Amino acid sequence: EISNNRAERAIRPFTIGRKNWIFANTPKGASASAVIYSIIETAKANNLSPFHYLQYLFVKLPNIDITNTTHLDALLP
């Protein structure tokens, strides 16, 4: 049987947290929140610690050419 339970469980924190995101103040702030949320959920889906994965990205990203997709692909879990 096909089920979307995994997807629904993944968006649950987003649904619960959205009432707090009214303080993003701008569309760019909301977009940044969505990007960080996506990165965190991707880390969780790949059995990584979200904190350590974000820490890794924050160290690596300033030192790469972000216009080079090969460099970005290397950062994916």
Image (cartoon, rainbow, N blue to C red):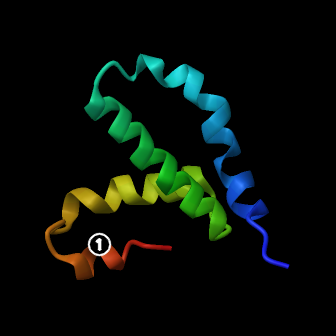
Decide: is 62 above or below 37. Answer: below
Residue at image point 35% right, 79% down: 74
Task: Compare residues 18 and 63 and report the one nearer the observer.
Answer: 18
Q: For the view shown, which residue lies furthest in the right direction?
A: 1
Q: For the view shown, which residue lies furthest in the front direction?
A: 1
Decide: is 67 above or below 12. Answer: below
Quadrant where the N terminus sits is bottom right
Residue at image point 40% right, 48% down: 35
On the image, the x and y values in percent for residue 10 come to: 67, 54
Task: Compare residues 60 and 47 and report the one nearer the observer.
Answer: 47
Q: Check disc 1 and give the amino acid type.
A: Leu
37 sits to left or right of 47:
left
Q: Secondary structure at mark 1?
A: helix
Residue at image point 50% right, 46% down: 37
Q: Quadrant of residue 56?
A: bottom left
Decide: is 48 above or below 19. Answer: below
On the image, the x and y values in percent for residue 28 come to: 26, 34
Decide: is 68 above or below 30. Answer: below
Task: Compare residues 2 and 43 and report the one nearer the observer.
Answer: 2
17 sits to left or right of 70:
right
23 sits to left or right of 67:
right
Number of marks in the rendered image: 1
Residue at image point 64% right, 48% down: 11
Label 1 crowd (10 A; few <14 / some 14-19 / many >=20):
some
On the image, the x and y values in percent for residue 29 come to: 32, 30
Task: Compare residues 72 and 1 and report the one nearer the observer.
Answer: 1
Instruction: Name the residue beneath numbered marker 1.
Output: 72
On the image, the x and y values in percent for residue 65 come to: 15, 68
